Image (cartoon, grey):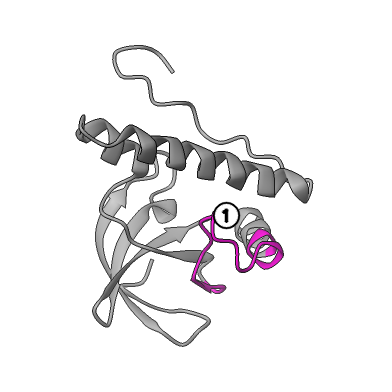
């Protein structure tokens, strides 16, 4: 991946640290990037995944519950997402005082996001649940 990527929007992203190394193909690793004073995630994907992701983003444009790319680079097959320092799961696990009412909201919104996918005949297979101390 080049150290500078130009998105379809014309925005320039400067590649930074590797966030996640792809175990089989390093070109498909995930990187943090900066553009202006904002941080982003650059995710190189295979062409079929790239095309499907853009189709999905088009179908769910404006969704408040689904995380969609905010930009892309067709030449390199890169999807660009906003960068967040943590995940909702980590936020909840790391803060035992996280209010139960907020936990319930997060679960409800996650369920609504899956329902939104199903309403347009998309299936979410997701990833294995996080299971500390056990097998996933």
Was residue 110 drawn as part of the magenta stretch in this picture?
no
Q: Residue furthest right?
A: 121
95 or 12: nearer the eye?
95
Expressed as whole percent of the image width and height from the top left, the position of residue 35 reads 30, 78
The residue drawn where x is 49% and y is 70% is: 70
Left or right placement of residue 101 versus residue 69 in this view: left
Left or right placement of residue 110 versus residue 106 in this view: right
Left or right placement of residue 59 versus residue 80 in this view: right
Expressed as whole percent of the image width and height from the top left, the position of residue 67 reads 51, 56
Q: Is residue 91 above or below residue 42?
A: above
Expressed as whole percent of the image width and height from the top left, the position of residue 6 reads 43, 81
Q: Is residue 121 above or below residue 101?
A: below
- Kindly state the secondary structure of the residue where label 1 is placed: loop
116 or 125: nearer the eye?
116
The residue drawn where x is 68% and y is 48% is: 117
Q: Residue furthest front?
A: 101
Magenta stretch, main secondary structure, is: loop
Q: Which residue is mark 1?
A: 46
The residue drawn where x is 49% and y is 65% is: 78
The residue drawn where x is 59% and y is 47% is: 113
Magenta range is 55-75
- Which of the 4 quarters of the picture holds residue 130? top left
Q: Is residue 3 above or below residue 88?
A: below
Expressed as whole percent of the image width and height from the top left, the position of residue 59 reads 71, 63
Was residue 63 drawn as part of the magenta stretch in this picture?
yes
Left or right placement of residue 103 versus residue 93 in this view: right
Q: Residue furthest bottom?
A: 10
Crowd class of label 1 (few under 14; some 14 to 19; many from 20; radius 10 Å): few
113 or 59: nearer the eye?
113
The number of numbered discs placed on residues in the rendered structure image is: 1
Q: Quadrant of the N terminus?
A: bottom left
Q: Quadrant of the C terminus?
A: top left
């Amino acid at each position: 991946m080049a150290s500078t990527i130009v998105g379809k929007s014309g925005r320039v992203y400067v590649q930074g640290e590797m966030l996640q190394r792809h175990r089989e193909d390093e070109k498909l690793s995930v990187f943090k990037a900066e553009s202006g004073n904002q941080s982003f995630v650059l995710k190189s994907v295979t062409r079929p995944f790239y095309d499907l992701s853009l189709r999905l983003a088009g179908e769910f444009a404006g969704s408040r519950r689904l995380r969609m790319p905010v930009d892309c680079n067709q030449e390199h097959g890169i999807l660009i997402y906003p960068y967040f320092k943590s995940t909702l799961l980590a936020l909840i696990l790391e803060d035992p005082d996280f209010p139960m009412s907020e936990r319930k909201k997060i679960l409800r919104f996650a369920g609504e996001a899956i329902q939104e996918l199903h309403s347009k005949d998309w299936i979410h297979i997701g990833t294995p649940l996080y299971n500390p101390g056990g097998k996933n």
